[in-house]
Image (cartoon, rainbow, N blue to C red):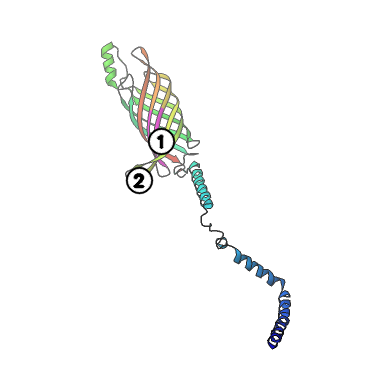
Amino acid sequence: MRAAIGVFVAGWVMGWIAVPLAAHADDAPAGDRMIDKKLAKADAKPADARKPTGEAAPGSTAICIDQEIADRLAIKRKRRGAVDRLFVKQGRHEISASGGYYASDLLSGSYIVGGSYAYHMTDETAVEFAGWWTHANADIIRALEDKRGTVVADTYSREIFVESLLVWSPVYGKLRLGGSIVHFDLHADVGVGVIDSGTSRGAAGVVGFGMRLFAGEALAFRIDARNRTFRQDLLEERFLVNDSAVTLGLSVFLPLHN
């Protein structure tokens, strides 16, 4: 009997103490309750979800694949873009002096010297005006005189060519010479000219191709091969000839800087 009364009294006392504590917990500020809820949600999330946003969850490769594709596209766009030229010709004037070997259809080979001026409208296109001087080789003329019994008055007849050409440079590149890298371009020429010589006076068609090797920002070495087609009178006969010349030259570009 006494034990039952003791248990009843103890239970009544505990219930009396718990009621104020519960009321005090309900009276806690709303902010504290929100913080408790957030902490509870954070504890409930998986460990992988709480990693920094910059790191992909283990087993996920989507982000890496997307980044790899973006990098490849960026490289392709860079390859398709314009490549800066170390030697810029656009808007510049080129003055050249050249000399080389002249081969004639009807006359013996001889030397040829000349000069040219070119204005580069773009890096690929230019207009050029050139003048050349050579002479008729006397050896073959004397042989013709002996065979036909006809005498050519001037066995050292000079020949002058004046030309106007369009120059197209579709190829620009570089090559290694020794231990250094040299930039170059390849160009094609087409135009018309006028011949003044003892055996021919008239128009000529000119075609050719060549190469420039650039040195610094103002100098270039030139190699040119050109063919000239015109009519030539010799020993009372008229011929359609194709005379060729190969020349080496030095060019100066103005202004002196790109």
Instruction: Report the residue marked by disc 2.
Output: 180
x and y percentages locating residue 73 in the rendered image: 51, 45
x and y percentages locating residue 16 in the rendered image: 73, 82
Q: Which region shows up in magenta?
A: 208-225
Instruction: Report the residue marked by disc 1.
Output: 96
Residue in view at x 53 percent, y 52 percent: 63
> What kind of element bears circle 1?
strand
Amino acid residing under circle 2: Ser
Mark nearest the camera among 2 and 1 is: 2
The reply to whether the magenta stretch includes residue 222 is yes
Number of other residues with Cα within 10 Å of mark 2, as a class: few under 14, some 14 to 19, many 20 or more? few
Residue in view at x 33 percent, y 26 percent: 102
User: In terms of image quadrants, where is residue 41?
Assistant: bottom right
Separation of marks 2 and 1 at Cα, in angstroms: 24 Å
x and y percentages locating residue 186 in the rendered image: 41, 34
Number of other residues with Cα within 10 Å of mark 1, as a class: few under 14, some 14 to 19, many 20 or more? many
Amino acid residing under circle 1: Ser
User: In terms of image quadrants, where is residue 50?
Assistant: bottom right
- Against 97, residue 25 (above or below) is below
- Against 138, residue 1 (above or below) is below
Question: Which image quarter is the N terminus in?
Answer: bottom right
x and y percentages locating residue 179 in the rendered image: 33, 46
